[in-house]
Amino acid sequence: MIKKTEKSGATISYNTVARDLIINDGTVCGVKSDDREFLGNIVIIAEGANSILSNKAGLKISESKEMF
């Protein structure tokens, strides 16, 4: 899956901490790390239990009381 994703033009950056979002006209268009900026039409925030960037983007994480 990773190879196919990269072949389609995606950038996967390992061991990189996204420190901040790049927002243009109210739309997330990238992230900033310590030493680089990543720009894209689609930004996937995969921060796990840490929701700092999701909160900054205004994404609301709902808590379901239902058991799955």
Image (cartoon, rainbow, N blue to C red):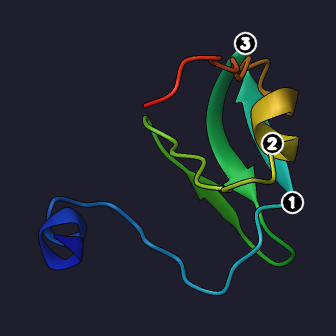
Of tags 2 and 3, which is closer to the observer?
2
Q: Position of residue 19 (x, y in %)?
A: 86, 60
Query: Residue 4 versus residue 62: which sits nearer the camera?
Result: 62
**Residue that numbered label 2 is attached to:** 53
Q: Residue at x 80, y 43 (%)?
A: 51
For label 2, the crowd category at 10 Å Cα-Cα, with few meaning under 14, some 14 to 19 and many 20 or more, is some
Q: Position of residue 7 (x, y in %)?
A: 14, 70
The Cα atoms of the two marked residues, 2 and 3, are separated by 17 Å
The Cα atoms of the two marked residues, 2 and 1, are separated by 8 Å
For label 1, the crowd category at 10 Å Cα-Cα, with few meaning under 14, some 14 to 19 and many 20 or more, is few
Q: Is residue 23 above or below residue 60?
A: below
Q: Which quarter of the rendering shows the C terminus?
A: top left
**Residue that numbered label 1 is attached to:** 19
Query: Residue 57 versus residue 47: which sits nearer the camera?
Result: 47
* Earlier sequence position, callout 3 versus callout 1: 1
Q: Position of residue 14 (x, y in %)?
A: 55, 84
Q: Is residue 55 above or below residue 48?
A: above
Of tags 2 and 1, which is closer to the observer?
2
- Please name the amino acid that badge 1 sits on: Arg
The Cα atoms of the two marked residues, 3 and 1, are separated by 20 Å
Of tags 3 and 1, which is closer to the observer?
1
Q: Secondary structure at mark 2?
A: helix
Q: Secondary structure at mark 1?
A: loop
- Please name the amino acid that badge 3 sits on: Asp
Task: Name which quarter of the figure residue 57 lies in.
Answer: top right
Relative to 33, is 68 on the left or the right? left
Q: Which mark is residue 25?
A: 3
